[in-house]
Amino acid sequence: MSAYGIGVGIDFKFHGTVANTLSAHRLIQHFQEEMGPETADKIVGSLFKQYFEEEAHPAGSTTLLRAALDGGVERAKAEAFVGDEYEALPETKLLIREQASNGVDAVPYVMLEGKRRDFTLEGAKEVDEYLKEFEKVVKESK
């Protein structure tokens, strides 16, 4: 994993805290709905960097606040959201339950819609595995 990361500019660390990421998902979901996917992408990028490279606690208030700020959320709004652990919690849990009922229990979960059938990739995969699935979709669409 470290070798793959170095090749793309990620310096993975493996001694950080492993913890529940519900608060991080709540943060992402809330600001994606409120501010759009670009904001959510920036928040995710910040969370990944903090967790995988800086060994930050994935649900720590400092981690969440920094991610929100890195995502472009105004400080007062970010602090209020991070300080209220129940804001957007029911909605986030509902979305998680919906996906679980669809059989999603790993990340990433990528579904490619084919002409005759769909292709699904669950969990971390090599680039070649994604390419093979894309090739199947293209082949079957002819």
Image: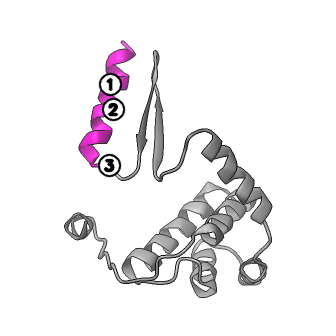
Residue at x 75% of width, y 83% of height? 83
- Residue nearer the viewer, 139 or 107: 107
Quarter assignment of residue 8: bottom left
Q: CA distance from mark 3 to mark 2?
A: 11 Å
Q: Measure the C-alpha gap from mark 3 to mark 1.
A: 16 Å
Quadrant in the picture for residue 7: bottom left
Which residue is identified by label 3? 125
Q: Amino acid at mark 1?
A: Lys
- In the picture of the structure, the residue carrying the numbered disc 2 is 133
- Kindly identify the amino acid type of the residue bearing the numbered disc 2: Glu
Q: Relative to 108, is 23 on the left or the right?
A: right
Closer to us: 33 or 112: 112
Crowdedness of circle 1 by 10 Å Cα count: few (<14), some, many (20+)?
A: some
Q: Main secondary structure of the magenta part?
A: helix
Residue 118: x %, y % from top left? 47, 26
The span from disc 2 to disc 1 (Cα, nearest Å) is 5 Å
Residue bearing mark 1 = 136
Residue 60 sits above or below residue 91 on the image = below
Question: Residue 15: x percent and y percent?
Answer: 36, 83
Element on which disc 3 rests: loop
| Mark 3 / mark 1, whichever is N-terminal | 3
Q: Name the quadrant of the N terminus.
A: bottom left
The magenta stretch spans residue 131: yes
Tell me if 28 is positioned left or right of 16 in this view: right
Q: Amino acid at mark 3?
A: Lys
Residue drawn at point x = 48 percent, y = 68 percent: 45
Magenta segment: 126-142
Give the numbered dot on residue 88: none
